[in-house]
Amino acid sequence: MAMKLYFLKYVVTAFVAALVFTGPVSAQHAEEALLEQLREAPETEAARLDRALSLIWDNSGSPAMNLLLKRGRDALKEEETEKAIDHLTALTDHAPEFAEGWHARATAYYQAGLYGPALDDLERALALNPNNYNAIFGLGVMLREFGDLERAAEAFDRVLALNPHHENAKTAMEQLERNGIGRTL
């Protein structure tokens, strides 16, 4: 029985991935279902559901745009921030409705110390995909860095409402709560 349940999890994940690549309406329904599952899932299932959501969010629908996203992220990993910004700017220029392109470029701008452009790109990413808890987390990090602790706490709360297993958001909230921010009396 345990083997069947284990196998079923991977079948469901493969099915969700297949839906992602069949069209935007199917991907939207799959995203909603995965977010609901993530909110209710035990800790042991969170990483799998997070990966399934990433498959949806990282798919622009164009192999060329997906390649630009990959090249931009690879450059970020290699700490080649300018190169990352160039790739991700090409991506946002050619696929302005692709939320993850804006989110990735916001990360690159942030790493380059360009906070204004990073905030602009996060705003655009979240307008296109308000459920991207990683982009919301990035916004919270920036707000905390700017000293706007109340709004940072609101952002981290939103992350945890979408993904209660987001370890970085949990840690950030604990740090704010130690300082008296985000506590309820």
Image (spheres, rainbow, N blue to C red):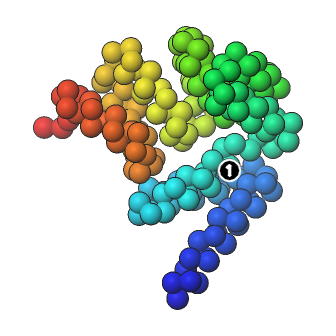
User: Looking at the image, is 19 positioned above or below residue 93?
Assistant: below
| 171 sits to left or right of 41 | left
Alpha-carbon neighbours of circle 1 within 10 Å: few (<14), some, or many (≥20)?
some
Q: Which residue is mark 1?
A: 55
Which of the 4 image quadrants contains residue 26?
A: bottom right
Counting labels gives: 1
Q: Is residue 80 visible?
A: yes
What residue appears at the point 41 percent right and 63 percent down from the top-left corner? 42
Residue placed most toward the observer, 127 or 133? 133
Looking at the rendered structure, the secondary structure element under dot 1 is helix
User: Looking at the image, is 151 positioned above or below residue 57?
Assistant: above
Percent from the top left, x then y, of residue 5? 55, 80
Residue placed most toward the observer, 18 or 43? 43
Which of the 4 image quadrants contains residue 100?
A: top right
Identify the residue at the far bottom of this view. Answer: 1
Percent from the top left, x then y, of residue 109? 60, 17
Residue placed most toward the observer, 43 or 37? 43
Percent from the top left, x then y, of residue 39? 44, 56
Percent from the top left, x then y, of residue 120? 58, 17
Residue placed most toward the observer, 157 or 110? 110
| 102 sits to left or right of 5 | right
Q: Is residue 120 visible?
A: no
- Which corner quadrant holds the C terminus? top left
Identify the residue at the far front of this view. Answer: 78
What residue appears at the point 61 percent right and 76 percent down from the top-left corner? 8
What residue appears at the point 39 percent right and 18 percent down from the top-left corner? 145
Amino acid found under the numbered disc labelled 1: Leu
What residue appears at the point 64 percent right and 64 percent down from the top-left corner? 13
